[in-house]
Image (cartoon, helix red, strand yellow):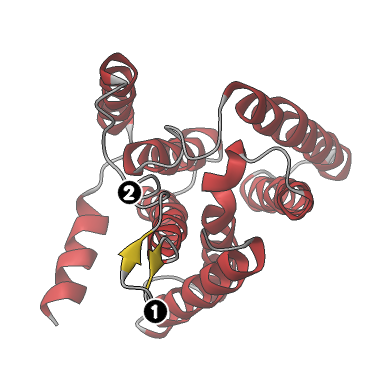
């Protein structure tokens, strides 16, 4: 398994590169590019949400909670203009931090075990759709930007899962470690009902997600170019 520093470095480098490319080809502006890079980096740490005994992971998720709370406030401030903006923003930041760090992350940490369902593609896709729906319905961002945030989170998470699989191969000994196949997975035979529910949630989120046509056109254009 790749260590925390490796996950952080690779996710940051990849997300930043993709964000700069997106800004260069005029998909979005500098502010959105920065936010996408940050969200992608957080996504690169997200699969280790089930790793509750690691000091680096704890520090990383504390930092991630601070960053995500700050992003929410920035987006809120850009969307709403009112006299009590500063006070409302501070309250929103505090509530967001407490909810993310001590409710969401702590709950996931206690209810999951490492390399379980959290270390799977559909689970990370659910997180990506949650970010997309939250940005669109909660922060009233455009459908394209909302999908961009969700896609960047998912890309960061996929980088994490891919790194864990790569590190499960002993190249010098040309053999697989026992951890091989436990990171980048779509299904587990031993958990059919859990994965059925997970895919049901994924499909439900997709149906209530904002229109994806603009994002799909951009992806097809990039792939074909």
Counting from the top left corner in percent of width and height, residue 121 is at 33, 44
Q: Is residue 20 left or right of residue 139?
A: left
Q: Is residue 92 above or below residue 112?
A: below
Q: Is residue 107 above or below residue 4?
A: above
Q: CA distance from mark 2 to mark 1?
A: 19 Å
What residue sits right under mark 2 in the picture? 181
Q: Residue at x 45, y 58 (%)?
A: 164
Q: Nearer the viewer, residue 8 or 72?
A: 8
Dot in front, 2 or 1: 1
- Choose top left, top right, bottom left or bottom right for residue 51: top right
What residue sits right under mark 1 in the picture? 172
Secondary structure found at label 1: loop
Q: Are marks 2 and 1 in contact (CB under 8 Å)?
A: no
- Choose top left, top right, bottom left or bottom right for residue 117: top left
Counting from the top left corner in percent of width and height, residue 187 is at 26, 34
Q: Residue at x 59, y 70 (%)?
A: 6
- Choose top left, top right, bottom left or bottom right for residue 151: bottom left
Q: Nearer the viewer, residue 32 or 123?
A: 123
Q: Is residue 179 left or right of residue 44?
A: left
Q: Residue at x 79, y 50 (%)?
A: 55
Secondary structure found at label 2: loop
Q: Is residue 67 above or below residue 132?
A: below
Q: Is residue 54 left or right of residue 194?
A: right
Q: Residue at x 51, y 61 (%)?
A: 40
């Amino acid at each position: 398994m790749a260590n925390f520093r490796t996950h952080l470095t690779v996710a940051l480098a990849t997300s930043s590169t993709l964000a700069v490319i997106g800004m260069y080809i005029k998909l979005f502006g500098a502010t959105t590019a920065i936010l996408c890079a940050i969200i992608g980096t957080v996504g690169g740490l997200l699969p280790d949400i089930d790793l509750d005994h690691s000091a680096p992971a704890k520090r990383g998720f504390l930092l991630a909670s601070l960053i995500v709370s700050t992003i929410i406030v920035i987006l809120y401030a850009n969307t709403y203009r009112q006299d009590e903006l500063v006070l409302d923003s501070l309250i929103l930041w505090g509530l967001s931090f407490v909810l993310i760090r001590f409710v969401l992350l702590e709950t996931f940490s206690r209810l999951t075990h490492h390399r379980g369902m959290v270390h799977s593609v559909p689970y990370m896709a659910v997180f990506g759709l949650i970010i997309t729906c939250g940005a669109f319905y909660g922060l009233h961002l455009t459908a394209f930007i909302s999908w961009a945030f969700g896609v960047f989170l998912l890309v960061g998470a996929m980088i994490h899962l891919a790194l864990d699989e790569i590190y499960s191969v002993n190249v010098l000994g040309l053999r697989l470690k026992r951890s091989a196949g436990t990171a980048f997975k779509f299904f587990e035979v031993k958990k059919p009902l859990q994965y059925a529910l997970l895919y049901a949630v994924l499909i439900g989120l997709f149906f209530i997600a904002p229109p994806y046509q603009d994002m799909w056109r951009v992806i097809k254009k990039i792939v074909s170019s």
